[in-house]
Amino acid sequence: MYGTVATARVVNSLSSKVTQIGIGIVRTSPIGLISGYMFGYLLADLLILIKIRSELHLFNNISLKKMWGLAVRYKRFPIFSMWSQLANMISLQLTPFMLVYFFSSTVVGYYSMANQLLVLPLTLIGDATSQVFFQKASEVNNITGNFKNILTDVHRRLISIGIFPMIIFMIIGEELFSFFLGSNWYTAGIYAKILAPWIFLRFIYAPISSAFNILEKQNVALGFNFVFVISIFGVLYIGGTYGDPIIALTLLSATAVLLWGAADLYILRMSDVQCIEEIKNVMEYLIIALVISLPLIVVKYLSLSVYVIFIVAFAVTFAYYLVVMYKDITLRDQLYGILKTIKNKL
């Protein structure tokens, strides 16, 4: 029921943000942030409960004996995955704590806004992809013992979809934040430019990281996440001693690109995917993205009106995804199917 899960995620995201903003307009308080966060999950949970009422009979097949057998069979999940997830969350949440320690809450605010606006749209795509990939890859692996074809398709599609937004943010990050959030957020746009390559690697890595669970390599995932925590702490400490948040975030982004890139290549290798072919695929789409974005680079360099910059940005984005659709027949057919379904419903 992927449609239900996707709808619940959208409801969660929209309702939490609307509630937080609404309470914030009335009164600025942490209570608004917390209550909005809880309200979003409450609505999402209620939606899922309503949708699965017809499937409640499945619980009749559950028994303590089966539960115990599965607990023993998949004991590596709680033994390794719990600590791996903890390390992963620490690695992602460590940055604001260290930024506020070395710099100020203002710097943390700029970082958080840049990170949130970069992550949010990609997370919607990445989370949905992750769920489908885990189910399909597990099924194929159980039948054939290999899921490299599915992994290759998903990996290449994530690259083609995610690489152009990264380029856009790296070119006009300051203009985007200043225009939509106000001139006070200009610095957040600079931070977004620095963080964009890291967010792009996270976008590719996160959905396919479930391969560790499929192949029961949870101990390896724990090792990677532990290295992530130590490395992020180290580079932020070094950057903090220089007293410049730009240096700290640049070191962070560069280190994260290397670490997440290495983890991504490891997943490809252990799944029998040709890493060199995937690197070539990244370079191919990177070159396409850079060539198509040249007009945007030119208008940015000429310091033209922000409206001209945004018109050109929209045009080159449209052109890039036309190329993606042309190259990816499966994606094009899926989009046509969705549009046809919407048309029929209207």
Image: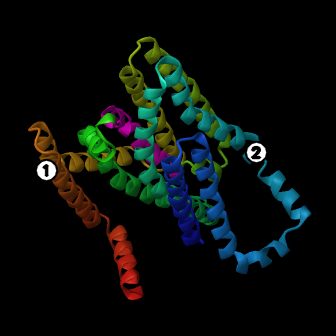
The amino acid on which the numbered mark 2 sits, given as a three-letter code, is Pro
Q: Position of residue 109 (x, y in %)?
A: 45, 33
The answer to if 191 sits in the magenta stretch is yes
**Measuring 43% from the left and 39% from the top, which residue is drawn there?**
113
Please name whichever residue, 115 or 251, is drawn nearer the observer in this view of the structure.
115
Query: Few, some or many C-alpha atoms within 10 Å of disc 2 (few <14, some 14-19, many ≥20)?
Result: few
Query: Which label was assigned to residue 308?
Result: 1
Residue segment shown in magenta: 185-207
Q: Position of residue 190 (x, y in %)?
A: 31, 33
Q: Position of residue 303 (x, y in %)?
A: 11, 38
Secondary structure under tag 2 reads helix
For the N terminus, the image quarter is bottom right
Q: Which residue is mark 2?
A: 78
For the C terminus, the image quarter is bottom left
The answer to if 7 sits in the magenta stretch is no
Please identify the dominant SS of the magenta region. helix
Residue reaching furthest to the front: 26
The amino acid on which the numbered mark 1 sits, given as a three-letter code, is Val
To which quarter of the image does residue 133 belong? bottom right
Please name whichever residue, 59 or 179, is drawn nearer the observer in this view of the structure.
179
Q: Position of residue 188 (x, y in %)?
A: 36, 35
Secondary structure under tag 1 reads helix
